[in-house]
Image (tube, grey):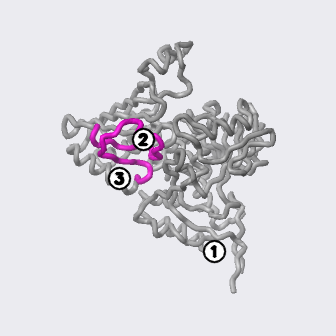
Amino acid sequence: MNTTTTATRTVSLKSARAAPAATAKRSARVGVAAHKSLCQKVVLGGRQAKAIQQALQLPATVQTRALSAVQVEASSDKIKVGINGFGRIGRLVMRSILARDDVEIVAVNDPFIDPSYMAYMFKYDTVHGRCGYECTGSKEGFFVDGKEIKTFACMNPAEINWASAGADFVVESTGVFTTLDKAAAHFEGGAKKVVISAPSADAPMFVMGVNDEKYETSMDIVSNASCTTNCLAPLAKVINDNFGITEALMTTVHATTATQKTVDGPSMKDWRGGRGASANIIPSSTGAAKAVGKVLPELDGKLTGMAFRVPTQDVSVVDLTCRLEKEASYDEIMGVLKTASENEMRGVLGYTEDAVVSSDFVGDSHSSIVDAKAGIALSGSFVKLVSWYDNEWGYSNRVVDLIAHMAAAEVASNISDTSGFFSTKPSTA
């Protein structure tokens, strides 16, 4: 009789979906439906190589999604994550992690918040409601449902002892350490990979569903781009792949963010940005459209855009006006987007024909939700497309999805070397 020292492992397609308030504990299972049977109930360990080889046989459009679904169910082998910066994105990344069973939050660093205040800020949220977990904080630490989340209060990332908490991945969500050189400080404390939750001037940039298949395990620091790029890029990819984009302009009508002023105040680099957020529609610059050229090189130089900051708390909307190479009716374009949302872009791109408004998308985990009733076409080659996004929750879910994708790539690269990234034990006879 054969025996094994490995924990039972399974492959499944998973992605966190909207989990505000009462639904926070529900783990979502979103993936490519046509290949769901392949990715469920496949026992790994001795059969791990076969499982990943099967995934590699899938079409390119879903191959990376299947590989990113490789995960270890044994709690001791969950992907362990630390968060640097417990702001809007940091807290929602943690909510997303807690809604999944393949990733585990083990530590938080924030020099401006003690454990008691961490617990309070995590428990209550004006936009997304109560977190649905029992949260306590004291001098002894920060606890969620009785489990301790190790806390640090370091200003310098190099001083954070991630190794003591077992954190392999670090989400860099301060908005400060966004370059390769600055983010690399996390390695001093034992982190193995860093995901920057913001655009980066020099780190490799990835948008799930768009260019995640280009990730290589040698990339220790990556950027998840911006929330607006995550909304725009999937939309632009589908349109460009099917009709070709000659040129395009984007406008994002963007909800208020923490960097804006509650009342008029100094803003030397952007005078308009210093005006009161709750009383104005504020024109602003954005690098989101140009960033699409980094994740979709074929669109480099063909796309640019701007933003309007508006006095709403959450949910933004992209207006993409583009000239097409191949003429098509508006209905044909919507048909292609709907099909993509149900197949290769499922979980990333959404689609609706309902008469919706911004608040209807609070808690929607998609990166981008096409509003079929809001767009218009002037001709067969000139069209305006509209797509919504929860700029907080949707983006935070993609941060976690990117972590899972990177971890799966490590598993794939270490099939023949089980002493690699995850320190798994080989099967024995």
Neighbours of disc 1 within 10 Å: few (<14), some (14-19), many (20+):
some
Image position, residue 70 (x, y; %): 56, 62
- Left or right of residue 321: residue 427: right
- Earlier sequence position, callout 2 versus callout 1: 1
Instruction: Write the residue at 56% across / 33% down.
Output: 201
Work out whether residue 192 can be spotted: no
Instruction: Write the residue at 49% across / 58% down.
Output: 29
Image position, residue 185 (x, y; %): 71, 38
The amino acid type of the residue labelled 1 equals Gly
Magenta region, residue range? 345-374
Q: Which residue is mark 3?
A: 340
- Circle 1: element type: helix
Q: Which mark is residue 345?
A: none
- Earlier sequence position, callout 1 versus callout 3: 1
- Circle 2: element type: helix
382 or 102, which is in the foreground?
Answer: 102
